[in-house]
Image: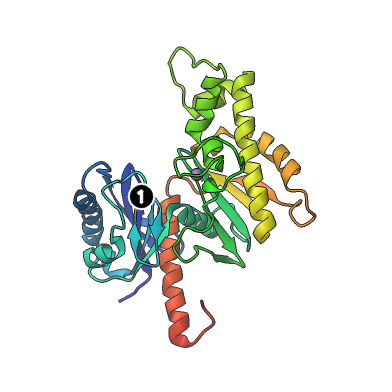
Amino acid sequence: MQNDLVAALDIGGTKIAGALVDLHGRILVRAQRPTPAQEEGETVMRAVEAVVAELSTSSYWPRARALGIGSAGPVDASKGTVSPVNVPGWRDFPLVERVVAASGGLPVELIGDGVAITAAEHWQGAAQGYDNALCMVVSTGVGGGLVLGGRLHPGPTGNAGHIGHISVDLDGDPCPCGARGCVERIASGPNIARRAVRDGWCPGPDGDSSAAAVAAAARAGDPVARASFERAAQALAAGIAATATLVEIDIAVIGGGVAKSGEVLFTPLRRALRDYATLSFVRALTVTPALTGTDAGLIGAAAAALGAGERKRDVLLGGGGS
Ligand SMILES: [Zn+2]
């Protein structure tokens, strides 16, 4: 039997997506359920099991050699547990153990969703060919992950690169994480919208006060809407510059709903980076939109499953894998 496929799960606050993916990152089979995010933990787990069960009815299923999970965080990959902020029924929930059981004993690799998107962008997207990259998602929250020395760098618990919760404003607004002035507190979509409304921007007749509506107003020249995006860009630039200075990255890739605002975000972001990324070894840093779309979480989870398989093979063969 060929073991040339992997299974992937992308677990978020609104949906649980599953897929069988080939070695080129092509999705062959899909399954999906809504996340009953406000229900008790076992109910959420039953939705995960339903997705795995549906995948396992496919004729491709016997070819899956491992299963990767990208989950909303925090995750703890060292313990195999997850505690997603938006799924209160899961606190230190033993997701890996449960998915191993649901999948009939496949090896399971768990990473956070920011790390998953980084894996996807490195494999298939804008970070392809780069050995040192920061990939970010800027949407309802701000997440991220790192590629260092040509390899995904999830860190001991699977959360490394979580740029949304580094502080760029020491005495700034309190963040739900407990700190102050976090990148997310300034640059997430809801915070872009909140600041625009606070400073006097009024939504149009449709009443849409989302970050996308603020972006449309900014494109049309509204100065308050523009200023809100400029402030977000400044926070992102400070976080990216700090990351580049710490670990030397060549590229920062930004995806998520707010990145879809395009030049309304990227033009002030590139300008702000010149203010913060000043040392010789970070000045050449480029910032670019992500290329993997809505399947990024699944593709990244598949990449993690493949990577885990390769690392295990390295160990068995006495190779140099870590
Ligand atoms: Zn925070």
Task: Give x and y (percent) for residue 54.
Answer: 22, 55
Q: Secondary structure at mark 1?
A: loop
Relative to 113, is 96 above or below? below
Relative placement, left or right, of 30 versus 149 is left
Q: Is mark 1 within 8 Å of ligand 1?
A: no
Say which residue appears at 24% left-offset and 63% top-offset: 98
Say which residue appears at 76% left-offset and 51% top-offset: 283
Task: Give x and y (percent) for residue 189.
Answer: 50, 34
Residue lying at the far right of the rendered structure: 280
Q: Quadrant of the N terminus?
A: bottom left
Q: Give the quadrant of residue 52.
A: bottom left
Residue lying at the far front of the rendered structure: 171
Relative placement, left or right, of 3 versus 306 is left
* Residue 288 seen in this snapshot: yes
Relative placement, left or right, of 21 versus 55 is right
Relative to 132, is 46 above or below? above
Task: Give x and y (percent) for residue 94.
Answer: 28, 62
User: Foreground residue, 6 or 132?
Assistant: 132
Q: Which residue carries the number 1 mark? A: 84
Say which residue appears at 52% left-offset and 47% top-offset: 165
Query: Number of marks in the image?
Result: 1
Q: Callout 1: 10 Å neighbours few (<14), some, many (20+)?
A: many
Which amino acid type is shown beneath numbered disc 1? Pro
User: Foreground residue, 80 or 312?
Assistant: 80
Task: Give x and y (percent) for residue 272.
Answer: 71, 39
* Residue 250 seen in this snapshot: no
Q: Give the quadrant of residue 77.
A: bottom left
